[in-house]
Image (cartoon, rainbow, N blue to C red):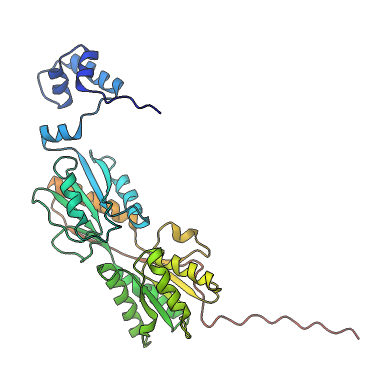
Amino acid sequence: MAFPQRVKMSDVARTAGVSVATVSKVVNGRYGVAAATVERVQQVITQLGYEASLGAQSLRSHRTNVLGILVAEFEPFSTELLKGASKEVAGTGYQLLAYSSGDGGGTAIGWERRSLARLSGTLIDGAVIVTPTVVETKQDFHVVAVDPHTGPSGLPTIDSDNFAGAVLATNYLLSLGHRRIGHLSGRPDLESARLREAGFRKAMADAGVAVDERLVRVGGFRVESASAPAAELLSLPDRPTAVFAGNDLSAISMMDVARTMGLSVPDDLSVIGFDNVPESALVNPPLTTITQPLQRMGAEALRLLVDLIAGVERSTHIRLPTELVVRASCRPFPPPPRASLPLTARPT
């Protein structure tokens, strides 16, 4: 497939029969051009598909009218946030640039600094950064963090109530009668993971159920990192009857491992996740989980960024609620007895 060459300002000028200086005035909204000429140039711009270079536009006006959403990688969590941000950007006068650092799935400390250094000032006017490790920005460049590693600080932040969500998840398993409950935690360097484990422990303590430390393993929030600790949990002589996984990907990994070990979910093992990414409803059985409103988080982050750039006074920390979503991956423990079949009379 052949792509046309980039349309230049000189192409617009030649087609419209005006000077490049006149086209420049029209593109940048400056005075001194007759209305009929403005209309003709704008028609040619539409006809040819001319777009000003972001770099050149930035040099002229110090604005690009583009906002960035920066992620370590495009995985289910960040993809849902991006959906929300892309819906919210409509009508703001901005365009949205999605950018992935490519720095090892977000495990490299400082990936967001390098991303901002490449983009700020020339390509974007502000940025939403998803799960940043550390952020230090120029004072005149606005940044909003979604679910930062260290939790809310001085940086404008959007997150969800991870602690309350974990309490919900654990209480649900307790309400089903489970007492040997395992926890497949997230990355230790993430505040959200620490809060989810703290919520799990609080719910267990409030119920008077001791946490068996052998049933707590680090899953790392990823399918590949969760599989080995999931297998360790299910290989214990007195394995858990239920597992609260730190996120949906870990929960899905737990279900896959259980299946390979000949265990049935939920007959032999109840599993509950966290996030409610689309994949959670598509697995078999569909995953019971805690939903954090990911698309709303992306939309709120985008709106907060637009307001900050506009100088609107408002709260710079937004925490959204979490809710339980019951599907089919959990069941009561012990399971209800099977109904006995009626005895048939023997023929005489």
Asked where in the image residue 97 lies, by quadrant, the reply is: top left
Examine the rendered structure and indicate whether residue 66 appears above or below residue 60: below
- Where does residue 232 sit, x and y in percent of width and height? 43, 77
Residue 183 is left or right of residue 304, and the answer is right
Asked where in the image residue 3 lies, by quadrant, the reply is: top left
Closer to the camera, 323 or 80?
Answer: 80
Quadrant including the N terminus? top left
Examine the rendered structure and indicate whether residue 289 appears above or below residue 16: below
- Where does residue 149 sit, x and y in percent of width and height? 23, 64
Closer to the camera, 198 or 337?
Answer: 198
- Where does residue 96 sit, x and y in percent of width and height? 26, 42
Answer yes or no: is residue 325 visible: no
Answer yes or no: is residue 19 visible: yes
Quadrant including the C terminus? bottom right
Examine the rendered structure and indicate whether residue 74 appears above or below residue 218: above
Count up the numbered dots.
0
Closer to the camera, 152 or 150?
Answer: 150
Asked where in the image residue 90 lies, by quadrant, the reply is: top left
Task: Report the residue that reaches farthest toward the top.
Answer: 17
Residue 215 is left or right of residue 159, and the answer is right
